[in-house]
Structure formats: C-alpha cells, structure tokens
Image (cartoon, rainbow, N blue to C red):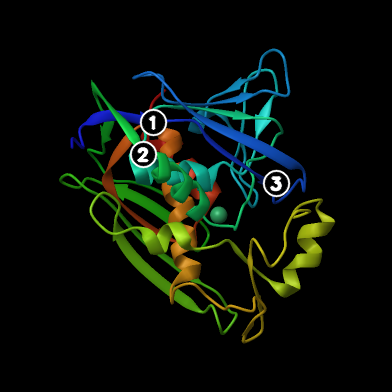
Amino acid sequence: MSLLTQKTLKKNVKLNGVGLHSGNKVNLNIKPSEPNTGIYFKRVDLSSNNIVFPNFSNVSNTDLNTTISNEFGVKVSTIEHLMGALFGLGIDNALIEIDNDEVPILDGSAKDFIDEIIKFGLQTSNAPIKIIKINKKINFEDGERYISIEPSKLSLDIDFQIKYSNELIGNQRNKINVYEDDLNDIFNSRTFCLYEDIEKIKSLGLAKGGSLDNAVVVKGKKILNETGLRNSKEFVNHKILDCIGDLYTSGYRVIGSVICSQGGHFLTNKLLKKSIRK
Ligand SMILES: [Zn+2]
C-alpha cells in the first residue's frame, strides 16, 4: 500500500440522481484513467468541446455550489461533494462522464460516492502523486469571514468554524487532519439550509431538486428531517467536506494548514487563486 503513488478506480462506477439546483435527472459514470491525467469531466450529452477540468481557474460560479466551465461555456455544477470524495479516497486520476450540467446531489453528502467507489476498489500505479506544499501564510478576508493557509509538515489540516444566529446551528467548530483522521463523519455530513431561506433560494431559480432526502432543513430549534442529524457536528462537518472538495480544484494533494471562519466555495476559491500561480 503506497500513499505516495497515483491511484485510480479499478472499475467504472455508475451513479444517477437529480441535480440539487437544476432538478434535472443525471447519470454519472466515473471511469479509471491513466496516471497524470488528473480528474476531468466529459459532458457526454454534447458532441464537442465537452471536456471540463475541475481547476480553480475554471471556477465560474460559487453561489451555493462550485461550478466549473471550459472556454466554450460548457459547465458542470455542484462538483464539490464528488471532488471531496475523490480527494478523501486518494484518487488522482478519473474520467467523469456526465450527461447533464450538474453532478447529482444523491443524499446531500459524499456517502454514496464513497460507498460505490470503495465497493470496487482502487488501482495503484507507479507514478508519484502530485503535491503542493504551502511555504508561506496566505489569507483572504471578506468582512467577518476569513480563510488562511500556512505551512504544515506533512499534513493537510482544516480548522473550520461556522457562526449562525439560528440557535440550533449556533457556533460549531471542528479541526481535522485530512490524511490521517477517519473522515466518515465528514463524508456522511449533508448539505443544509434554514427553512426561512428556502423561498429566497427557490426564487433565484436554485434548489429545484432540493428535498428532505438530500438536505438538512432547520426551522428554529427543529430539524425537519425525521431521522435528525447523522453526527453532532454535521453542519460544520459538511462545510469541511465542501472545503476539501474545493481544495482539490488545485489539482494537487495540498500540504498545509487551513483555518476558515464562516467561509465557503467563494473564499476557498479566492484562497487558491492567491496561493497558486497558474
Ligand atoms: Zn456542500
């Protein structure tokens, strides 16, 4: 078992579901790929110009999801949970065929991606992994929200906090070591929203596929999902999952220590743009 050589999937992994924001039905086929090809999407509903690379410089929208677009305007949205699963499992190379413009939301977490991929296993190559080691502190602030990354020895640490005026969510903080900790609680944590925000989000044409089957909905002191939370820090843990997925748009295994307060897709993307020269 080598942590230092590139990996891909052993077999094709097929999943289908609806897009959280588009509401469209979508089929995914995650396929093994050669060393040094990286992760890349192919829109199989289009016959040309249909390759989209999940690179931070191709991120075209960060409102309630991470969307990537190629130079022809072909896009794939809500890539972050799948990217988080691939990073967490140590998958360096994969071709993701998709027949619509949004990755299926499944249960709102990375659980189904993880379960399906590990069912078939991984294939190891002899090519060394690609890492990027942060050598000086970089930060980005936006009002009260901030994110920073600084050097670490060999780990990727993420220390994340959220501050909600909603009394059930409140302040939550968690710190994880991505390469060493058990990430099950992170992978299993679902996207969430406040009940009172649903109308506003829908009026923006978003969350057309949203339901209690793929998101935690909080109304005052109550969780509207019958089965409650999956873990006691599910809210902040989901934000950490998003952060891992967004960090993977660097194209590298990152060695560094991230601290984030009240951040999200926008801040993580800004941090990568400041940290990595193209
Ligand atoms: Zn998310």
Circles 2 and 1 in contact, beta carbons < 8 Å: yes
Visible residue check, residue 258: yes
Residue at (45% x, 46% y) in the render: 84
Kind of residue indicated by mark 3 = Gly
Dot 1: element:
loop
Sooner in the amino-acid sequence: mark 3 or mark 2: 3
Picture coordinates of residue 81 (x, y %)?
52, 48
Visible residue check, residue 141: no
Sooner in the amino-acid sequence: mark 3 or mark 1: 1
Residue at (67% x, 39% y) in the render: 102
Q: Residues within 10 Å of mark 2 (few under 14, many from 20)?
A: few
Alpha carbon separation for disc pair 3 and 1? 26 Å
Which tag is nearer the camera, tag 3 or tag 2? 2
Residue at (52% x, 75% y) in the render: 229
- Left-right relation of 65 to 271: right
Dot 2: element:
loop
Q: Which residue is mark 1?
A: 10
Quadrant where the image shows the N terminus:
top left
Q: Residue furthest right?
A: 203
Picture coordinates of residue 255 (x, y %)?
25, 41
Give whichever of 205, 2 is nearer the camera.
2
Q: Is mark 3 within 8 Å of ligand 1?
A: no
Q: Which residue is mark 2?
A: 121
Give whichever of 53, 92 is nearer the camera.
92
Kind of residue indicated by mark 1 = Lys
Vertical placement of 55 versus 229: above or below?
A: above
Q: Is mark 2 within 8 Å of ligand 1?
A: no
Q: Residues within 10 Å of mark 3 (few under 14, many from 20)?
A: many
Picture disc at residue 19 = 3
